[in-house]
Image: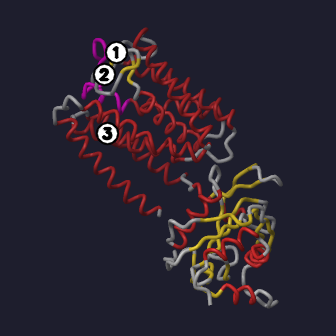
Amino acid sequence: MFNRQIIISGLALVFLAVGAFFMVNVELPPWSHYLSALNVALFALPSFWAVRWWLGWRDGMLFVGVLGLYALAIEASAIVTGFPYGHFGYSDLLGHRILGLVPWTVAFAWTPLILGAYAVAANLFNGAAARIVATTLIVTLFDVVLDPGAVLLGFWQYDGGGWFYGVPMSNFGGWLVSGFIGAVLIEVLVARFKPLLPVPMPLAFSVIFIVFFWSAIAAHGGLVAPALIGLATFAAVVAMYFKYHYSFDDKIVFVDESNTPIATGDKLPSHNSDTKLHRAFSVFLFNSKGEFLMQQRALSKKTWPGVWSNSCCGHVMLHEATEAAARRRMKYELGLTGIDLTCALPNFRYRAEKDGVVENEICPVFIGFADRQPNRNPDEVEATKWVDWDEFVASLDDPETDISPWAVEEVRELLASPVFNEQFRSRITHRR
């Protein structure tokens, strides 16, 4: 999956380089402000999506909303008073100007820049003061790349021009001021929200594309210094991304006895001889013949390698609904999508141990029905097979059964579940 993301990202960069060429060398049509506004919003989406997984929908929307409003306010101040950037004016190329002052797109253009700067700073420095200083300097560096190209395209102009490709020194001084305030604001918000996940480098994903695009604009427009600075900055952020990036689904969610999240941890190291209680799920899939889909866990698994178990198991990401996690993992492990799931055991919980590794999970159990063959992911699944449900249940009475201990416990409770029995009777039509 990560390799596919790299390929898609590479193609996107090629597209941006070509688009930059046309923006510099072809006269912008009268309707280009619509396209420019759309591009600004699209550039912001990757970082905003990362915020969603980092903080959740509610806190994430509040987080980017506060930053966006701040961006509009500080830009409006500059338009009216000249503070902090100096006097300048926007053209109509960035969309409708609120109260005739600042384009609405500024909230989507500035916010990913400060998020990317903060992501880099937070992964380099532990102290708040160091993060604030680093965020301020990094976001100003981004503007060194962006601003000359924006002036070249006529997005905005400074009164009297400026020494750096039409940009005055006052602008960069203003970015130090606004960046500092923005960095402090982020620290305040993060302290308020208390995220359980480390600051994710995907917050900088938008910046990677933005800096590359404006570096290409500068290169096509003959702006040598911004182009070189931009490419160096792009390479540095990409290197940071690969060094500090983590996948949200590689973090498990530790919970208290009431299933309230209290911390997160890396999936593999967190499974040890004293694994803390965390969130998970199990899925049992059936076909219309009354057969049950079994999965043999991949031999490379840290926990219960090669053991036969239920159709699909996995962990729930922070800020993810349990059913959504089940669907995500069914697609990833078995290549199965579009299956209706019913939660038959919402409160199932178990603890099991094998070879010194403990599983300790709050693990709702879902059931689903499908007459399709799975397409297994060999990194996760060694083999699959459909077995008669009654024969499978009977086999669990064998004290030497090699079925995973959680699947055994789950079957016992499923057999006593009214939800399971009603669903099973109504959906199985060709049972032997």
Residue drawn at the location 68% of the way across and 58% of the way down: 252
Q: Amino acid at mark 2?
A: Trp
Q: From this view, report whether residue 49 is shown above or below residue 118.
A: below
Q: Residue 293 at what x, y percent from top left?
A: 60, 80
Quarter occupied by residue 386? bottom right
**Residue 256 visible in the snapshot:** yes
> How many numbered circles are shown?
3
Q: Which of the two marks, 3 or 1, is nearer to us in this view?
A: 1
Secondary structure beneath disc 3? helix
* Residue sitting nearer the eye, 426 or 90: 426
Side of 422 relative to 114 (left or right): right
Q: Residue 228 at what x, y percent from top left?
A: 32, 39
Residue count near mark 2 (Cα–Cα under 10 Å), binned few <14, some 14–19, many ≥20: some
State the mark number for residue 214: none
Residue count near mark 1 (Cα–Cα under 10 Å), binned few <14, some 14–19, many ≥20: some
Residue closest to the far left: 26
Q: Was residue 163 drawn as part of the magenta stretch in this picture?
A: yes
Q: Residue 56 at what x, y percent from top left?
A: 61, 44
Q: Which residues are magenta?
A: 144-164
**Residue 355 visible in the snapshot:** no
Q: From this view, report whether residue 68 is shown above or below residue 260.
A: above
Q: CA distance from mark 1 to mark 2?
A: 7 Å
Q: If you read the primary sequence from the N terminus, does the residue marked by circle 1 or circle 2 appear first?
A: 1
Residue annotated with mark 3:
215
Q: CA distance from mark 3 to mark 1?
A: 22 Å
State the mark number for residue 156: 2
Q: Amino acid at mark 3?
A: Ser
Side of 361 relative to 154 (left or right): right
Secondary structure beneath disc 1? strand
